Amino acid sequence: MTPRYFKRFLFVSLAVVLLAVSMQHDFGTAWQSQYTYAFAPAAAAKQAAVPVQNSAKPPVVQEPNIIMTPKPQSLSNRVVEYHINVHLLEDAQRLNGEQAVTWTNPGKKTVSELYFHLYPNAFQSDKTTFMQESGGKLRQDKATAASNGHMNLLTLEMLNGESLLPRLQYVQPDDGNENDRTLAKIRLPEPIAPGNSITLRMAFEVKLPEVFARMGYSGNFVMAGQWFPKLAVYETAGTRGRTAEGWNVHQYHGNSEFYSDFGIYSVRIKVPEAYTVAATGFQTKAIEMKEQTKIYQFYADDVHDFAWSASPDFVYEETAYSDTGIPGVRIKLYLDPAHAKLRDRYMHAAKSALSSYAKWYGEYPYSTLSIVVPPKGANGAGGMEYPTLITAFAAEKENPGYDLERTVVHEIGHQFWYGMVASNEFEEAWLDEGFTSYAEDKVMEAAYGIEANLRVEASYMTDPAPLKQPSWAYKSHSQYAENVYMRAKLVLIGIENQVGERTMQKILRTYFQKYRFKHPSTADFQRVVEQVTKTKWHDYFSQYVYDDQMADFSIASIQVRPVTLEGTDMYESVVLVKRHGGVNGEIPIVMQFTDGKKVSMLWNAEQSHMHYKLVHTAPLDWAVVDPNHTNVLDNKIINNYMQAQLPEESRTRWSLGVVKLIEGLLGSLSW
């Protein structure tokens, strides 16, 4: 056994002892989790009743075929316009597509080149940047031997027929990996002037991987996410703090998600006759039956992506829903048959999420919201967001716990922070994932009475890192998830704890209203916080957003000695409180004497430490910093409490007990 393992077991042993002591003073709940976090070990769930299902209703199988028309007003700048025809071949593993894509120069300079994301090429080999960084794993999903996929551009031409394929160049601006073909540059024959447009025609084919990392096939189920050649974002001056306009381009990385510009999508999807299709947007034509195929026509505007899913097994159901901030939306369920009886739970979660987010942040302006439940074995496609379409976790369990509701609530939250606000997930993933995780908790508490155990979540923060950095700069997927989901949420709660829930809601609503369809940055959010609170937040953002700090406070020592004052026997107690990380507002401290008297105070924590001297007729019994865990960014709660002294007999007993415990642990693990 090496010394580092000895230290680890010594630490665990001491933690057990401290736990036993602290439980005598009502601090035992700090170690009891009542919340299950997606990126943390499962904990004991709060005993709330899972919604009762009406299993008497048989599965309803019908075909989505309601025709809708676009709204006249434009909500975004609509930089791009796609007209796509795609055909899912009979084997359900390949796509043949054609598209005409129009791009309008939003800047003030001429543009001589275009960049396209070719995301399916991430699965071309184990040498791509995505596969090397992910190791063929994403969340709990692993690539299989059949998880190879790719995209081939068959034609690329101007409207006059001039081919641009000879001008195509694969580029790797992030890591120089020549085996990565997820980003391509095209030098144009003529530059595009500001405000002018160019239209390109393209034909392409896609070999879908066996479902992994958000896309692919599983049996006869298909998830087409990031499936077409997609233009990158050309950022104008002022966007996300840019001083000079230009393309924002990155490869597909193991941690990163996506970033695109808003526009219009008109997509014609041909599938085998038995299939039902779920897609972004809404249908504009009746389903066409032709030569043992079905043809769907979908349309979406003011969105920055288009995804679709298909299966012959979908159990379809929909309902119309309106509420404050929801003028009218058709919620569409595409259920795996194994979860057909859970339709009411999916629908309730969707309505709860939409209603809450619209009231808190702003209107949901789209006319549809589709929820796809992948089949068992296809969880690689689950738990993902696209404009007006989300995927739940796969139907692995016949009667899942609240993970079902939590996933739906979380992914619908992305319709606001990813879908409409449209943060750059390559470079500032926390603005989407952290905000969505924060909002998800609020809905789960309001709708289902499930509260997050923030003490336990903070303790999971073992590897903090700056939030404002590229997704691939995190050293592992676990560090990425720990920070952009959990630590980012704690940072937002840290703001809320200082300003109050009502002001925090005003901050988020102001941010959403000001920047929806605008691609904001971390600096934009900070400005909103400062404008709403009329306070400078530079230090807070510097420590917790731009740096990797947590806010760890401890009772470092307690010294008690008898003194005589004016002929009276007294006790002088000196408590040393230390700050080991960043500042996070005033920190409460509670001290109790052996006669039961308690003293409470607040420390502004501007210094690295503080001595508190108290003189009382009884000696100090114990001291605790932040007993109610208002400082959610403290990830080392074990050092928050200290007992002043123990009777000699107890001290000897505890000392011998610790020694025996350590000896027992080492003995059981020795060779």
Image (spheres, helix red, strand yellow):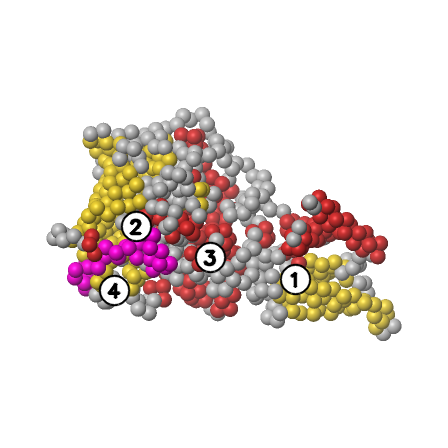
Quarter where residue 184 is shown: bottom left
Along the viewing direction, whichever of 36 and 474 lies nearer the viewer: 474
Q: Residue at x 35, y 58 (%)?
A: 176
Badge 2: residue crowd in 10 Å (few <14, some 14–19, many ≥20): many
Mark 2 and mark 3 residues within 8 Å of each other at the beta carbon: no
Label 4 and label 2: CA atoms lie apart by 24 Å
Tell which circle, 3 or 4, labels the residue nearer the N-terminal end.
Answer: 4
Element assignment for label 2: loop
Question: Which stretch appears magenta?
Answer: 168-197
Label 1 environment density (alpha carbons within 10 Å; few <14, some 14–19, many ≥20) = many
Q: Nearer the viewer, mark 4 or mark 2?
A: 2
Give the distance between the C-alpha atoms of the residues marked 4 and 1, in whole angstroms.
Answer: 53 Å
Residue 409 appearing in the image: no
Q: Of the residues under marks 2 and 3, which one precedes in the sequence?
A: 2
Query: In which quadrant of the rendered view does residue 576 lie?
Result: bottom right
Can you say whether 543 is above or below 509 in the image? below
Specify the label residue 107 is tagged with.
Answer: 4
Q: Earlier in the sequence, mark 2 or mark 1?
A: 2
Nearer the camera: disc 3 or disc 4: 3
Q: Residue furthest right?
A: 567
Apparent side of residue 16 relative to residue 37 in the rendered image (left or right): right
The disc at residue 474 is 3
Q: Which residue is mark 1?
A: 554
Q: Quadrant of the C terminus?
A: top right
Which amino acid is tagged 4?
A: Gly
Sequence-wise, which precedes: disc 1 or disc 3?
3
- Single out the mark in the foreground, 1 or 3: 3
Q: Which residue appears farthest toward the left when viewing the image?
A: 160
Q: What's the residue type where badge 1 is placed?
A: Ser
Is 484 on the left-hand or right-hand side of 642? left
Tag 1, which secondary structure?
Answer: strand
